[in-house]
Image: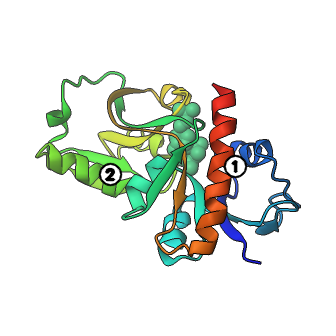
């Protein structure tokens, strides 16, 4: 019998809540995150623990059928991948931040400036929409350090509690997008696995209603 292959973040902010929601829909998974793949005991499902940034490509290629992933990652790398259910956890924003001492009135203030980010596609689209030219520095993590070391005038990164910004003497001045965890589906899913996904989604909907 066929099994639905679902990607879940291996470690990081979405991992625990992703595992919790699978548990809440009554799916019990054999193993923790030490193994990169695990099977459910009582549902035709296999879980693949992957890096966030790799998940959109796996969905595109049909290596996995579905994923629990942040909308922000889909916006950045998820061309043509649809999100079918908002899951209500891991809410965050992708925002512009600048040093506390600086002023900001609009996105136009970024003209000619250096922006450090891990979200180049999202930022480029935003700049283009607003007809602003800026220089991007792409960094994979610890983006908030960039203004302090003279690498950038502004950053665009995830803001959740705001504590990373605060600790680095930065302030949020604009919001590019609001994000939460979603259930995303591969364009290559088979009809057999689509049926399993429908059952999973049905259960998720009822758990989400119960959480409200
Ligand atoms: C993420 C993100 C922000 C921070 C936001 O970084 O890149 O820096 O969390 O959360 P907060 O508003 O609650 O402080 P993470 O800690 O995952 O590390 P990384 O950027 O080095 O990947
Ligand atoms: Mg960070």
- What element does badge 1 sit on? helix
- What element does badge 2 sit on? helix
Horizontal side of residue 145 vs 36, given as left or right: left
Q: Which residue is mark 2?
A: 122
Colour scheme in use? rainbow
Given residues 37 and 3, the one toward you in this image is 3
Horizontal side of residue 148 vs 105, given as left or right: right
Q: Is residue 67 above or below residue 86?
A: below
Question: Image quarter for residue 106?
Answer: top left
Q: Which residue is mark 1?
A: 15
Could one spot residue 161 in this view of the protein? yes
For the residues labelled 2 and 1, say whether their Cβ atoms are less than 8 Å apart: no
Counting other residues with Cα less than 10 Å from the Cα at mark 1, is it few (<14), some (14-19), or many (20 or more)?
some
Residue name at image x 41 percent, y 44 percent: 146
Residue name at image x 16 percent, y 51 percent: 128
Horizontal side of residue 23 vs 102, given as left or right: right
């Amino acid at each position: 019998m066929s099994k639905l292959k679902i990607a879940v973040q291996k470690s990081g902010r979405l991992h625990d809540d992703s595992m919790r929601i699978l548990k809440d829909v009554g799916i019990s998974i054999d193993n923790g995150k030490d193994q990169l793949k695990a099977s459910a005991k009582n549902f035709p499902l296999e879980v693949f623990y992957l890096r966030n940034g790799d998940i959109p490509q796996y969905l595109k290629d049909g290596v996995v059928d579905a994923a629990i992933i942040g909308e922000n990652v889909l916006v950045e790398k998820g061309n043509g991948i649809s999100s079918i259910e908002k899951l209500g956890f891991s809410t965050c924003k992708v925002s512009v931040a600048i040093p506390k001492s600086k002023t900001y009135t609009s996105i136009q203030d970024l003209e000619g400036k250096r922006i450090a980010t891990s979200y180049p596609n999202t930022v480029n689209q935003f700049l283009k929409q607003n007809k602003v030219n800026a220089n991007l520095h792409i960094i994979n993590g610890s983006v908030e350090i960039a203004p302090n070391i003279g690498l950038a005038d502004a950053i665009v990164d995830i803001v959740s509690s705001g504590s990373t910004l605060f600790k680095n003497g930065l302030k949020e001045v604009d919001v590019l997008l609001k994000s939460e965890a979603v259930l995303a589906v591969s364009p290559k899913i088979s009809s057999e696995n689509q049926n399993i996904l429908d059952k999973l989604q049905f259960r998720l909907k009822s758990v989400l209603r119960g959480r409200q």
